[in-house]
Structures are given as structure tokens and as C-alpha cells.
Image (tube, helix red, strand yellow):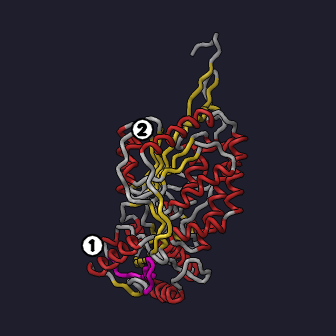
Amino acid sequence: METLTKQSPIRTVNPFTNQVVSEFDVMRRTQVNSIVEKAYKAFALWRKTSFEHRSYLLHKVASIMRKRKIELGKLATLEMGKLLKESVYEVELSADIFDYYARNGAEFLADQPLKITSGSAFLSYEPIGVLLSIQPWNFPFYQVARSAAPNIMAGNTILLKHASNVPQCAMIMEEIFLEAGVPAGVYNNLLIPGSSIEPLIRDKRIAAVALTGSEPAGASVAAAAGAKVKKTTLELGGSDPFIVLADADIDKAVHTAVYGRMWNAGQVCVSPKRVIVPGSIYYEFLAKTKNLFRMLKTGDPMDSNTDVAPLSSERAAKAVIKQIRRAVEQGATVLMGGNRVDHPGAFVEPTLITGVTSEMDAYREEIFGPVFVLYTYRTIDEAIEIANATEFGLGGSVFGTNIEKAIEVARRIESGMVYINHVTGIAPELPFGGTKHSGYGREQSPAGIYEFVNPKLIRVTTPESNY
């Protein structure tokens, strides 16, 4: 592996105050090499363990997370700024994912018989080795769970390269695995910068890579892995449409769209970033949206009365403000918000924008912050055209009381997921992933456990039979 150059410390910066809380040294080359070797050797033993034993340990991981959910929630809020109630929910969801694979993994990975004309055949699902998991900051526990749970249950081992602004969340997850009794080397945390990823991908001891992150990061990782013929899964964000049909329950649609967009201060890949409403109800929808916006309280994420938290960093807040100002310069209208909040933290006001047209950057790009963009349409074809006018294809929503019609519209949206009468959501048993520039591969559900296993064919014929 290549030598790691001298790097600045990895820091915890509280987005509510923009103050540095903790600093951690970047791991040296020798440390990283030792951890990779530990994961590689652990795989040789872990792959031989029974499903029952793996299940037992994953259930323990889930139990520990639930017992420590307030502690873990406060840590996530400290490091990346989300509302404490959202952080605690995230911990509970993560525990549910570990339990889901602990309960169902053996069934998912059981030998699958194949129908053939003579003899017998089956698929044997076998682990492939060390997985490098590269995860973002916006869901510092959930992102880890949906990557680690299925793969550890499958018999692989994990190297986690977490986002550099959530180092303590990364470290405490390794601590929880060890506390649960998972053997050392099965789950490993790496405190390294993004510049160290490509040398790791080239390491022969690493079998595959899973990344959730930006489109440029995904392209870089896929290229590096492809050069070494290593499989990848990529989840690269989205600009999800939220289509409201003329027969929708307007109050429910407005409430879902506004609070769905403000979830995690707008820093959610599947939040409703483009709300598309028919002209017949546009002004009523807009008026009710404004009313909800007036009720939103921005403030301390530890305060249960706060609705909108700070963004993850000062850099993120400045980037969102830059996108808002560019939209205005190109002709869009900011009806509410659009500025920084008068507080030292990384805050951006909840922002309502209208008048975005196809000539503007905001029509296609992802805005990762509390920015609600409202569109209007005359026909369903026009609504679909707006919905698909982006390189992303992650999630989407359709609201309407005629479910058959809503499903028809959902089928025309170019995305990996569409929810009807609900914001694009998350559940252990439902597959998560996208198409187009939102990446490829699926996490969660049965699909998530098959991404990094070898579906080996075993064909059986008797000695006396012909092939």
C-alpha cells in the first residue's frame, strides 16, 4: 500500500456552534496496513462461523444500540448537527436493520435449488472477503448499519472509512461490535482522509467496495475498483420529485412535503427536493406551505421544540446559500428564507423557491439543505417531464386518492423507488437504491445481502448418468 502523507487531524466540529470539540490523528500507513491485515485474516475464520452464531452477535449489537440510543443520538447531533429526536430515531432504525438480518439472513442465504431437466443443481451463496465501506455523515449510524449488517451476516468482514466530520460515531460503532462479542477484525474503523481511498481499493486483500456519497466520489471509486475488477455498489444522491395529483389530500401532501424536506435540515438523499403541483390547486398548496413555513423553528438541535437544525458544517451552509443565490440570479423567486440565520452555527433559513425553469441550474441539480422548490404543471405528461429532468434517479413520491392512477404515474418516474402518499422512506425490509447517476446496487431487504456474495452454482449428476 502507498505511504500516507502527513494529514491534518480529523475533527469533531459542533455545527450548532462551529466550535472544534475533539481532534484525532490520521492513522499512519503502518496502522492502516495492520488493520487491513487483521480484517483479511479475520475473514478466513469468520466465513466458517455458523449463521446461528452470526445472528446471535448481530442481535447483541442491536440490543446494545437500543440501550445506548440516547448517548449515541447525542453524539450524532454533536458531530453533524441533526435534531436529537432524529438522531435517536436513526439509532433505533439501525438496530432494527441489525435485527432484520440476524432474523432472516440464514433464510436468505440458504442453498437455492434450481429446476433442471436431469440430476440436480443449486446456488450456494458464499462470502467474498473484505468489504471497504465508504460512508457519509448525514446518517452516521444508519449508513453503517445498512452496509455492515447484511455483509457481516453473510460472512464478509468490514473496513469502514467514515466521513471525516463524524469520527466519534465511527469509533463508537467499532466499540459496540467488540462489546457485543464480535471477533476483532470482523468490523474495523479507519480514521483516514478521502485521499487514502484509492490506494486501499488497489490493495489485493480488499474484495469489493460500497460507497454512499457524491457523484464525483462514486465515479472515482468505480473507476479505481473497475481497474482491479472489483465489484462496487454506489448510492450517489438524488433530486427526488414529489408529484401531487389533482385529487390529493392537500393538507396531508403539504405537511408531508414540508416536513419531509426539512428532515435532517434537508440533508437527505431521498427528501422531496422538487414538489410538483397541478395548477388547479397550486395557490391553495402554496398558501398552506407558507403557513407551515412560518411555524418552523430553527435552533438548538438538542431542543425538542426545534424543527430545523443547522447543516453539517459551515462549508455545507455556504454551498447551499451559493446555490440559492445562483437560482435567484438566473430568475427564480425566493418567497421565504434564502439567508443565513443570525446564529454562529451552520444555519440556513428554511427556504421556499418558485419560478425555477429548465434554463436554471436548480432545475436539475441537488440542493442538499432546507430548500423547498415548488413547481406547477398543466398535464400529467408535463409533471413527468419535470420529474425526470435530472440526471439523478433515486426516489420519488406521488400523492393522490386514486391509487390506480398514482401507481400509473409512479411507473413513469425514472427512479429506484417511488412511495405513494408518503415521502420516500426507509425500512429494513425494503430495498434502497437508485438508477441513472444516483448509482447502482441495492441495500436493505433480501436484495442487500446478495450484493457481495458469490452465487456459486453446484451441479450434481450421478456417476452413471449422461450430462
User: Disc 1 vs disc 2: Cβ atoms closer than 8 Å?
Assistant: no
Tell me if 319 is positioned left or right of 298 in this view: left
Answer whether residue 352 is magenta in the image: yes
Marks 1 and 2: which is nearer the front? 2
Residue 96's disc number? none
Amino acid on which the number 1 mark rests in the picture:
Glu
Residue 130, percent from left and from top = 52, 40
Is residue 102 shown above or below 311?
above
Look at the picture and state if 42 lies above or below 277: above
Q: Position of residue 115 (x, y in %)?
A: 62, 30
- Position above or below: 295 against 128: below
Q: Residue 1 placed where, x, y %?
A: 39, 39
* Residue highlighted by disc 1: 359
State the separation of the CA atoms marked 1 and 2: 44 Å
- Residue drawn where x is 61% and y is 41% of the image: 154
Please state the extent of the stretch shown in magenta in the rendering: 342-356
Nearer the observer, 138 or 383: 138
Say whether residue 10 is left or right of residue 216. Answer: right
Circle 2: residue type: Asp
Identify the element where label 2 is drawn.
Answer: loop
Residue projecting furthest to the top: 464
User: Which residue bears the numbered disc 2?
Assistant: 203
Left or right: where does residue 65 sit relative to residue 455? right
Q: Residue at x 47, y 41 (%)?
A: 208
